[in-house]
Every structure is written in structure tokens, then in C-alpha cells.
Image (cartoon, rainbow, N blue to C red):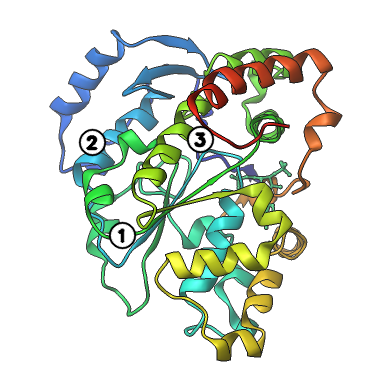
Amino acid sequence: MVLISWYSSSSNSSFPIINSSQISSGDERYQLEFQELLKTLPKEDGWKSDFLYQHQGFWGQPRLLLSSEACQKQFQAYDTDVLLATQPKSGTTWLKALAFAIANRKRYALSSHPLLLSISHKLVPFIEHGTSNDEVADHHQISNNYPSSQSQRVLSTHLPYASLPKSAKTSACPIVYLCRNPKDTFVSKWHYMSKIGSEDFGSLSIERAHDLYCRGVSLFGPFWKHILGYWEASLESPKKILFLTYEEMKEDTEYQVKRLAKHMGCPFSTEEENKGIIQDIIKLCSFENLKKLEESRENISIKDDDDDYTVFYRKGVVGDWVNYLTPQMAERLDQVTKEKLHDHGFPMFKD
Ligand code: A3P
């Protein structure tokens, strides 16, 4: 059993071995250039064993930065796609499940739904990642297997807005951004990284992780830059980018799911509403249901791989940070949020 992570490498090497054929057709020169570039980039301790490097304004491991570049070069968005954007641990798994269920609601009966068999990450791929720890995304495949069916292609990304592939911005493909209170995101991330990190690196103290997070050093971070990038873009192009928060989704899931479906270009009809389809989708994608499904798959090993995806379901509540952050830690993170977000006009997460 392997605890799954798309964000961290268990390798101790500062530069992972990448099969060039996975990036493009054998572009070894490109990789060598990238290795040279790495030597010039700002470098910080990672949350676990890897170093993080800052490139294009965000932090990532070399493999991630390289595959992100490949994504920018090769990924082609279609007008009919929908792209879900998040920072890690802000509700990606949930958003993917909901969007997949919405887009495919005419295709699958609830009794034989793909979400009963697979975690949403397998149904909605990251454009900048492969679907397993050791793969780099095959962008040719993601781009070329379309249209494989009549349904909408639902894709996801953790890339900051500024680093999205050009076609994702210029096409009519709707973008949905989900963000979450930084304190809860941090706590969720710390738990996750503590579980999936490499054992030989020792345990990750919350104090150390907190310091890195407050300084902006986290995958795809600084967190404030990620949020502001999508927030400002959503103000400029509200028809293109829907900005959601985890907290609002929890508070009134039905209302937000309707907004989501409308933004995706497939609003619920009155008939569907009357039939209770929205409630069915919400129930299917609820934390309790998805967690239970994943645990039972794990227990009886009915999966096509050895990965443990239960790590994506912890508590699924708002405000859990109070159980982990000292008043001083909360205050420091609040101060960073104020300076970097609120002082720049971002109106949410003020309490
Ligand atoms: P907690 O660690 O606070 O419980 P991501 O999907 O971006 O990795 O985020 C993971 C967080 O979302 C975890 O938060 C997880 O429990 C929560 N989560 C996962 N599935 C969810 C669902 N269906 N509904 C609500 N929260 C969910």
C-alpha cells in the first residue's frame, strides 16, 4: 500500500530522473537546459525531503516545474472543456467529484457511477501531472484523446493563473477556482504532508511547516499570490472565471452547485431540479459518502493500483485550524493574510 501524492516526490535526489519521452518526443536538450536553469533558481527546504525551487513566481520540485513547462507548451484547451483550478488541500477532490458528476449526469446512472469505483482524481486529470507518482503528464494524450465522447472534458490544475497554458486563458473554456481559508488549508496540508512524506526524513513539525507556509514556500505558493491571481482575473472576466470558496460550498452546497453547473454551461433544468438530481449529486459527492467508498475500496482491495487514496479525506470541516494552531501561529498567518490579501482588496477570510 502506497500513500499517494501528486505533489511530493519520495526521492531524495534534488533532480529526479525524467524520461524525456514522457515530456515530448525525446527532448533531452530541453531537460539539460532545465537542469542548468535550476542552478540559478531560488531554492528552499521542502516540506519533506525535496528542495523547492521558485520558477515563474511559484514554488515546486524540479519535476513539477518541468512538467508545468511542458504543459504550458503542449496543452491545448478546447472551448467545450472546463478547467478546475485550486491550491492543494483546498477541496480539489470534492470539486472534481461535483464537476464530473454534473458534466456526466445524463451519461451515468447513480447505481453504476464511476465515482463509486474511482476517486475523482482518476476521472479528472491534472493537466500538469500524470496520474501516478512517477509519471509526468502526457499532454499529448490529454490533448489528443478529445473528443473521445460527447461529454464535456473536465480537467484540473494547481497552476497559478499567470502560469496557465495560453489556450486555457484565450479559449472559451470556463475556469472554476476554489479557494479555502488559509488557516484550514495549512492545517490540512500539514496533515497530508505528514502522512505522505518519506519516512527517512523524520517527522514534519507543524512549527516548521507553518514558518515555510507563512513565507510563501509551499507547492504552487505563495498561497496569497495563487488566490490573488485568480481573484483579479475573475473580477476582470467573471463570465470566464467562477470564484468559489470551500466555506461557501459547505454552507450552501445546493446554491453553489447550481452556480457551478451554470458556469460549466450545463445548468440544471426545472425538470432535473424537481426530480432531485441536484440533491443526488450532492449526496454522491459528500465527504461522508466519498470517504466511506474509498475506505471500502481500500479494505477489500478492489483497485487497479496499490495506492491509498483515503489520505484525501480527513475531516472535511470548516475551522479545524483551532485544534492545531497556537494563538501566535494563527496571528502570524492572519497578519500575512491581511498584508498580502486584504490590503490588496481581497475581501474574504477576514475572521
Ligand atoms: P481536511 O484535511 O481539512 O479534512 P484537496 O482535495 O484539495 O486535497 O483537499 C483536501 C481537503 O478537502 C481535506 O480537508 C479533505 O478532508 C477535504 N475533502 C475531501 N473531500 C471532500 C468532500 N467531498 N467534501 C468536503 N470536503 C472534502
Callout 3 amino acid: Tyr
Q: CA distance from mark 1 to mark 2?
A: 29 Å
Residue 246 makes an appearance in the image: yes
> Is residue 150 placed above or below 171 in the rendered structure?
below
Work out how far the residue at label 1 is from the one at label 3, CA to CA, in angstroms. 25 Å
* Quadrant holding the C terminus: top right
Which residue is more in the foreground, 4 or 254? 254
Q: Nearer the viewer, mark 1 or mark 2?
A: 1
Q: Secondary structure at mark 2?
A: helix
Q: Is mark 3 within 8 Å of ligand 1?
A: no
Tell me where residue 338 sits by quadrant. top right
Q: How many labels sit on residues?
A: 3
Q: Could you say where residue 34 lies in the image, as x and y percent from the top left?
A: 23, 21
Q: Which residue is mark 1?
A: 173
Q: Which three-letter amino acid code belongs to the residue tagged 2?
A: Ser
The relative height of residue 329 versus residue 342 in the rendered view (above or below) is above
**Which mark, by number, is residue 194?**
none
